[in-house]
């Protein structure tokens, strides 16, 4: 049987061997050097000190891709925003079809608490992991795409065109991505598939892809009660601005659990399971969520059932109080009753909930008829819609399932997740008719956004092989 005649769910012979050699010998050394480039995302670089580093990071990857990508690859840099340029790597196909692949090289700040011998910008290979900022959160994806295409070219496997867009504002909620859509549209108006590899996974034993995620509404709740701060002895006569604020939050949520009680924020399209494979993978997801949240003690109703724990951060709207302004420093002697307080709050909305409508409902519930005639204001500061896409086409789920089984040893799993990926929603709105595979290997102990970020190398090889297989399957999708 020739490669051209293979069914699309048949694995490509020798693909994994080729991918491992390419990734280890060619991609990994360059990715390790990339760790040394600080390249803060624009939102964390208020003085624009990283403009040069943004261009250095793209040049670093561009030089590597120029030397290694398949013959005929065209590489160009677009600069619509100086501190957020975009690199386009256009790898020609040998058959019809185009896959648009998104990645990023901007980085989250270094953070504190790195283990001895580790740092954010010093690459360290240890225990089958590459440590350093930007390894798993950003850097892996572009190298994965090029390595996958290289393996297919080396083996002579028919492949579609692979258009790779490497951008620089992902960690800043993709604030500059849309500026480059006209350029991408001019190169490919209607891609056949979009891939993004910056999502989490619950373990490294299978390919995980997102079937939807929650949205988030952030804002400030301000309560003004007194003309000026008073001595704490006035409590009982002078109402507490902080107490009123929590009383108002009690209108929308059960405060101990953080679960939102407003009817309008309840999910409309809830599925029985969080994952596509049912209770067994629901339990894996639940254990991942519990570990990521740091829930280590026994909590009745939560830790006694990992399957049920998987549901809580997905299908429930929730409230978090992230900060309180107006209180006295805790070390002061005596006490002061503040005249006003401002609470920074975040509300997570289930997949499919209209965030704009939800923000209006929140405001009405919080500011209407305030206790003690207090002055209350709720001002949303950030709104990231959730994502609830149509199911993936059958050929893609079959391809992902087969690739995951071949390279990871277990079938692929789709799952709803609790976090928000603003860039995915931006892409989905622009390319509304294109299926999108949102996956990644930011799994247990990946530590993205915190100290000791690490790329799991066995998972990286398996994911790269899986993406190569999906690329090879696209021409046979019909």
Image (cartoon, rainbow, N blue to C red):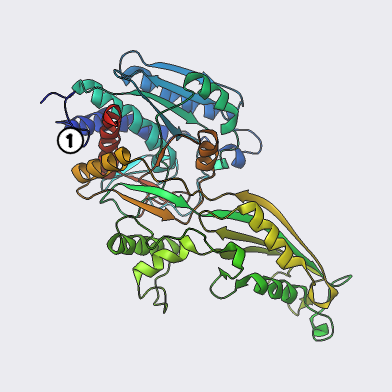
Query: Where is the C terminus found, in terms of image quarters?
Result: top left
Mark 1: give few (<14), some (14-19) or many (20+) Cα within 10 Å. some
Query: Where is the N terminus found, in terms of image quarters?
Result: top left
Residue 19 falls in image quadrant? top left
* Left-right relation of 140 to 280: right
Which residue is outermost to the top?
72
Q: Is residue 275 visible?
A: yes
Q: Nearer the viewer, residue 109 or 348?
A: 348
Picture residue at 43% right of the left edge, 52% below the top: 114
Q: Is residue 326 visible?
A: no
Residue 453 percent location from the top left of the image: 40, 48
Residue 31 percent location from the top left of the image: 36, 33
Which residue is outermost to the front?
478
Q: Nearer the viewer, residue 221 or 128?
A: 221
Residue 217 percent location from the top left of the image: 62, 55
Picture residue at 61% right of the left edge, 63% below the top: 264
The residue that mark 1 highlights is 10
Q: How many marks?
A: 1
In terms of secondary structure, where does tag 1 sit? loop
- Residue 361, placed above or below residue 229: above
- Residue 283, placed above or below residue 122: below
* Left-right relation of 267 to 61: right
Residue 422 percent location from the top left of the image: 54, 44
């Amino acid at each position: 049987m020739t490669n051209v005649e293979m069914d699309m769910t048949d694995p490509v012979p020798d693909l994994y061997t080729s991918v491992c050699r390419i990734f280890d010998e060619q991609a990994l050394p360059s990715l390790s050097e990339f760790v040394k480039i600080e390249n803060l995302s624009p939102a964390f670089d208020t003085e624009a000190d990283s403009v040069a580093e943004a261009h250095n990071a793209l040049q670093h990857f561009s030089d590597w891709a120029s030397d290694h990508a398949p013959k005929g690859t065209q590489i160009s840099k677009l600069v619509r925003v100086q501190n957020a340029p975009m690199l386009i790597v256009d790898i020609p196909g040998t058959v019809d079809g185009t896959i648009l692949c998104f990645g990023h090289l901007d980085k989250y700040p270094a953070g504190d608490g790195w283990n001895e011998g580790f740092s954010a910008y010093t690459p360290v290979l240890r225990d089958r992991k590459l440590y350093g900022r930007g390894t798993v959160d950003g850097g892996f994806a572009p190298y994965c795409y090029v390595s996958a295409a290289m393996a297919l070219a080396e083996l002579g496997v028919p492949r579609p065109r692979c258009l790779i867009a490497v951008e620089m504002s992902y960690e800043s909620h993709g604030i500059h991505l849309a500026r480059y859509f006209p350029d991408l549209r001019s190169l490919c108006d209607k891609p056949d598939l979009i891939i993004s590899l910056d999502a989490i996974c619950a373990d490294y034993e299978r390919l995980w892809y997102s079937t939807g995620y929650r949205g988030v509404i952030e804002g400030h709740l301000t309560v003004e009660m007194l003309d000026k701060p008073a001595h704490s002895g006035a409590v009982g006569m002078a109402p507490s601005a902080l107490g009123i604020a929590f009383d108002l939050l009690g209108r929308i949520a059960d405060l101990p659990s953080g679960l939102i009680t407003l009817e309008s924020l309840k999910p409309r399209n809830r599925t029985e399971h969080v994952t596509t494979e049912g209770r067994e993978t629901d339990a894996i997801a639940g254990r991942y969520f519990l570990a990521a949240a740091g829930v280590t003690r026994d909590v009745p109703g939560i830790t006694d059932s990992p399957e049920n724990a998987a549901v809580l951060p997905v299908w429930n709207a929730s409230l978090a109080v992230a900060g309180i302004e107006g209180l006295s420093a805790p070390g002061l002697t005596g006490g002061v009753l503040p005249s006003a307080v401002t609470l920074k709050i975040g509300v997570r909305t289930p997949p499919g909930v209209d965030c704009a409508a939800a923000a209006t409902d929140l405001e009405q519930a919080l500011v209407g008829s305030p206790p003690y005639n207090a002055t209350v204001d709720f001002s949303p500061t950030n709104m990231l819609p959730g994502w609830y896409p149509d199911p993936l086409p059958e050929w893609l789920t079959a391809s992902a399932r087969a690739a995951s089984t071949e390279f990871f040893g277990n079938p692929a799993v789709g799952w709803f997740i609790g976090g928000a990926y603003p860039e995915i929603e931006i892409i989905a709105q622009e390319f509304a008719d294109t299926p999108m595979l949102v996956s990644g290997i930011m799994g247990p102990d990946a530590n993205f956004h915190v100290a000791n970020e690490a790329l799991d190398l066995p998972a990286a090889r398996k994911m790269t092989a899986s993406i190569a297989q999906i690329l090879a399957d696209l021409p046979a999708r019909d």
